[in-house]
Amino acid sequence: MSFILQGIGVSGGITIGHAHLAAPAALEVVHYLIPKNQVSKEIIRLDNAFASVRKEFKLLQSTVTSGPALAEFSAFIDLHQMILDDPTLSEATRNSILQTHCNAEWALTQQMDVLLEQFEAIEDAYLRERKTDVVQVVERVLKALLGHPGYLPPASKNLGDSILVAHDLSPADMMQYKQHQFTAFLTDMGSLTSHTAIVARSLNIPSVVALHYARQLILEDDCLIVDGNRGIVIVNPDKYVLDEYRLRKSQIELEKRKLKRIKTVAAVTLDGEAIDLYANIELPEDLDQVKESGATGIGLFRSEFLFLNRDDLPSEDEQFEAYRYVATRMRGKPVTIRTFDLGADKNLKGTSQVAANPALGLRAIRLSLTEPQMFLAQLRAILRASKYGQIRILVPMLSNVSEINQTLHLIESAKQDLRAEKIAFDENIQVGGMIEIPAAALCLEIFMKKVDFLSIGTNDLIQYTLAVDRVDDTVAHLYDPLHPAILWLVSRVIQTANRAKMPVAICGEMAGDIQFTRLLLGLGLKQFSMYPAQLLTVKNQILKSYLPDIIPLAHKTIKTDNPEKILGLLAKLNS
Ligand code: PEP
Ligand code: MG
């Protein structure tokens, strides 16, 4: 049966391929085959995961030694222990790996499905409810398995034209998929500027999120057309639709090839204004794409991605190597390293989110300042790497001037230690502030006294100004970059910085969205930082823009409070 699903397109382009369903447990897993000679190793991996959960249960038991909760808690752990030890879970999973040579995660979730079906048939309501416990135990074992490198198919495995269909993916999950060759991503959950979407965009393949029922309605191996521009998924299309999309796909590819011609052309408007086009990266591996894009610098290195999907923290030396590699490969072009922005939707392994409002909680610089050892290790690594290129430090989520004061103090103390150890670094390293909280935008002048440059994080600025959670698709329709309050704040920051001759960039997703390019140029923006795949499209728009025409229209746009008029003016700007 053919049908269409509508979601939010977060990464453009068209893919035609076959569905590959992520497993139904809360932790998404994929299916792959284990080479025959590795099957016994896979079983050992499974056994180790069961053993480590057994240990977890022992530890949990020992944490509650008295009090009213003891009896209830013990009964709960005993029940989970029983499920864990039940051969219908472990033995059957083992047999399935032996017989079908599939990966442990897949075998386990398949067996979980079998058990859940059996529970469904039980008449006793209490026992039927124990389904949740089975899922929780399986999730624990899956978590233990995920700590092992075997979680995903080997990076070299050819996944053909597979399109991953998942209920939800965290930014950390998405990072794992970075090395795998899925040709598109579909999720039920998600929104345009969630970090999961940002990573999907950096993969440069079509992705659609907020599809709500994709995981339920799409079957393994269904033929899919994913249109990332329109946020549409066509399931089992007929021949005519397929032909139409094949044509569109080849047109898009042709356009992309044509754009490559301007890779080395300077980004200058028709009236001669030079614009800096920088790239956003998550890992040093993204540099190949940066080179392809012709970016003249890194405007945002989201360094926290070095901290995800691992059991330990990256050491100072490991971070130094990563930063040095990027600085060296960028050959003297600016490399803006944002200090780790952990918290909210990007958490260290094993530190699941407990705060009621994580986006308003201990995130980014707030977290860094509560973990001075971890923060100092990063600052030392950045400073040491600054000898190898033009590195700049960018501080995320500033809301209070004391945060920048404390950060500058820590940078100074790291510098002093390095001097004492006779380790070279760039004495004049620049420190910038991210303007992504309305308080910082409103009190900009105070922050400007402390920093060398500014970068506007529109993703968070929109979230915090409009009180719209950027990862919650139920309020995605309220997440509006064209809200008068956003336009006013963005324009205020750009103009205040320009007047003071302080460099200011936008590194949020607005910078890479071509519908805003002229508006931002007209407001005086000279530095744009975006995901590399979008850079040439934005450059093309800049090459066709004439500031004397654009500036009055842009200013008219920010003075208007009527949403329809704003859209009309935007259309005029882009015509
Ligand atoms: C932003 O908030 O706009 C930004 C660039 O940072 P991040 O998306 O990583 O929060
Ligand atoms: Mg941000």
Image: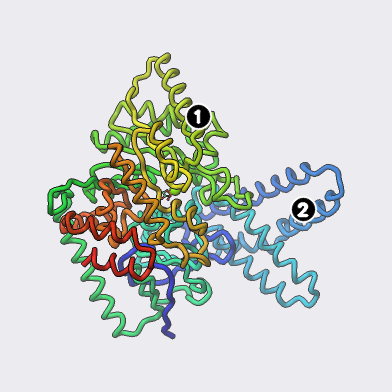
Query: Residue 556, percent across and down?
Result: 29, 60
Instruction: Say whether residue 175 is left or right of residue 69.
Output: left
Q: Amino acid at mark 1?
A: Gln
SS for callout 1: helix
First in sequence: mark 1 vs mark 2 = 2
Which amino acid, mark 2? Ile
Residue placed under numbered mark 2 in the picture: 77
Q: Position of residue 358 (x, y in %)?
A: 57, 50
Badge 1 crowding class, 10 Å Cα cut-off, few under 14, some 14 to 19, many 20 or more, is few
Q: Look at discs 1 and 2 and give the one toward the viewer.
A: 1
Of 435 and 493, which appears nearest the observer?
A: 493
The residue singled out by tag 1 in the image is 406
Query: Residue 142's mark?
Result: none
| Disc 2 packing (10 Å; few <14; some 14–19; many ≥20) | some
Could you tell me which residue is drawn at 25 percent across and 53 percent down? 521
Let me know if residue 285 appears in the view: yes
Front-most of residues 505 and 37: 505
Picture coordinates of residue 335 (x, y %)?
A: 31, 38
Position above or below: 292 against 255: above
Task: Residue 313: give x, y in percent of width and height.
Answer: 51, 36
Q: Is residue 514 left or right of residue 165?
A: left
| Mark 2 sits near ligand 1, with its Cβ under 8 Å away | no
The correct choice, above or below, for 220 with respect to 147 in the image is: below
Q: Is 133 on the left-hand or right-hand side of 72? A: left
The image quarter in which residue 455 lies: top left
